[in-house]
Amino acid sequence: MNASGGQVSAWIGLDIGGANIKAAHSDGPALSVPFEVWKRPDDLARTIRNVAATLPAASAAAVTMTAELCDCYPTKRAGVQAILDAVVAAIPDHAVAIWGVDRRFHRVEEVRDDPLIAAASNWLALAELAARLVPSGPGILIDIGTTTTDLIPLLDGIVAARGRDDTGRLQTGELVYAGVRRTPIHALAIELPFRGVPTGLAAELFASTLDVFLMLGDIPPSPKDLSTADGRPATLEAARDRLARMIGADREGFSPDDARAFAEAAASCLLERLARAADRACRATVGRPAAAVIAGSGDFLARRLAEVVIEPGGPIISLNDAWGPVSSAAGCAYAVVRLAMERSQPEGVPPPLSLPIAAALENPQ
């Protein structure tokens, strides 16, 4: 149903993260928009409105989130409430269903009463849908983004994760706070080799993993991209300068070859860290995975990790191939809108208590 009581004609899915807002439409279009919530929390509603306006018209929205952990909010409960406020203000004519960590959709009013049910829920939407690509045997979903990595055990097409909140998932290895763009280099190691000599790293945000993967050619240079450690462009030359500062050097004593070798060492540290976490995540639940589903803006690294952690010769399934590049780029938003479409039953449902689609989402399969 829509806000007037009629049948839902189309859905949008919204994945509201701390650094990006992703959206997908039930007819196919999708997009990802950088937006650092902690810097401009008062602009969240306006940004969601603008994102929704770029997609075709819809009468219902399925929403998932992780932005509640941003430090502009005193608690996660307060963050969820603020995000709900922003969504309702941004798309007042849409019926809204909120995805929860209990694998169900909820009305806004329900989530206001129990905010933590919706906190950090987006990974589970993606995993629920991606698990279908490994219908039998043990598998793993490897979703590497700009900031974090999800390592989700799968078994016979079902999510086998033990953690549900961020703390629990960090303890199980299912969540790693490291990604391919925003992770500070000093979070990967306390020292790295420079010309064969172990060299301590500055505990400062001089460089990030974006610089590592720029140097290695995994992320293309983008002179207009200023979301770097020093606010200078995401180019090879500027990346070399940033990496040099990590060991108290500058470009005069840190050649392009030095930068590439340094980046290779940093990338190896990250890969090893993720491999250890994947082993911890899977050992207690599914054992060694036989297959992997890879996703995220860091799918190039996810593929390398999959080759290490799954059984030799096992299939590696890219969501970029399975869902298409547009949908996979907004993976969690695409997943939540697909799940909402499947679980809504607009024909013959009883009247909702509040939002028109609530009854259709009351008993998901």
Image (spheres, helix red, strand yellow):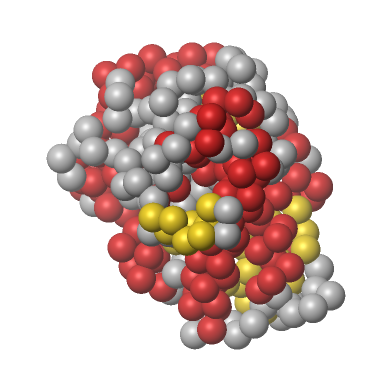
Q: Quadrant of the C terminus?
A: bottom right
Q: Position of residue 236 (x, y in %)?
A: 63, 29
Q: Nearer the viewer, residue 310 or 338?
A: 310
Q: Is residue 84 left or right of residue 146?
A: left
In this rendering, the answer to whether 214 lies above or below 306 is above
- Residue that extends furthest to the left in the rendered view of this protein: 74
In this rendering, the answer to whether 171 lies above or below 6 is below
The residue depicted at 50 percent of the width and 39 percent of the height is 243
Q: Is residue 192 left or right of residue 171?
A: right
Q: Position of residue 222 (x, y in %)?
A: 64, 22
Q: Position of residue 32 (x, y in %)?
A: 57, 29
In which quadrant of the rendered view does residue 95 lie? Answer: top left
The residue depicted at 55 percent of the width and 25 percent of the height is 238
The residue depicted at 49 percent of the width and 78 percent of the height is 280
In this rendering, the answer to whether 17 lies above or below 228 is below
For the question of whether residue 349 can be seen, the reply is: no
For the question of whether residue 310 can be seen, the reply is: yes
Q: Is residue 198 left or right of residue 256?
A: left
- Residue that extends furthest to the right in the rendered view of this protein: 313
How many labels were placed on the picture?
A: 0
Q: Nearer the viewer, residue 176 or 61?
A: 176
In this rendering, the answer to whether 240 lies above or below 313 is above
The residue depicted at 67 percent of the width and 42 percent of the height is 257
